[in-house]
Image (cartoon, rainbow, N blue to C red):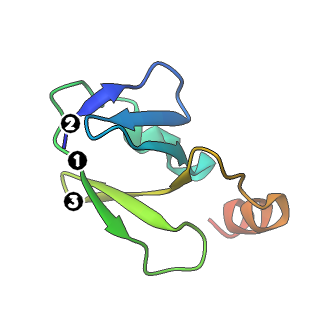
């Protein structure tokens, strides 16, 4: 899939119409994404996000745009690195 819309750093819309909220700790991995960037959506293997967007071997944790990240879990994960 390719990116349809990515003007906000924490939201990305793919060409299939799906919209994803990017995990705050993974935003740096998305800074160079361009419309021609190939992305694969896969189910997450951890308990933080529901899915991952895979691009060039990097996995970016995401949830549906309509969902919110649990604040405590985000803080704990960012603190642990």
Q: Residue at x 52, y 28 (%)?
A: 9
Q: Which residue is mark 3?
A: 57
**Whole-percent x, y for residue 29 in the image:** 40, 43
Evaluate if marks 3 and 2 touch, with contact meaning CB atoms under 8 Å apart. no
Kind of element beneath mark 3: loop
- Which comes sooner in the sequence, label 3 or label 2? 2
Please tell me whether residue 13 is drawn above or below residue 54 in the rendered image.
above
Point 76% across, 68% down: residue: 73
Check disc 3: other Cα within 10 Å, few if <14, some if 14-19, many if 20+: few
Q: Nearer the viewer, residue 8 or 58?
A: 8
Q: Quadrant of the N terminus?
A: top left
Q: Alpha-carbon distance for marks 3 and 1?
A: 10 Å
Rendered residue at 57%/51% (across/down): 23
Q: Seen in the image, is 49 located left or right of residue 68?
A: left
Q: Are marks 3 and 1 in contact (CB under 8 Å)?
A: no
For disc 1, the marked residue is 39
Of discs 3 and 2, which sits in the foreground? 2
Residue that mark 2 sits on: 2
Disc 1 on helix, strand or loop? loop
């Amino acid at each position: 899939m390719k990116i349809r819309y990515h003007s906000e750093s924490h939201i990305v819309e793919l060409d299939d119409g799906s919209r994803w909220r990017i995990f705050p700790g993974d935003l740096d991995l998305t800074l160079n994404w361009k419309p021609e960037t190939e992305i694969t959506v896969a189910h997450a293997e951890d308990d933080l996000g529901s899915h991952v967007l895979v691009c060039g071997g990097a996995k970016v944790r995401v949830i549906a745009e309509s969902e919110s990240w649990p604040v405590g879990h985000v803080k704990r994960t960012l603190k642990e690195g």
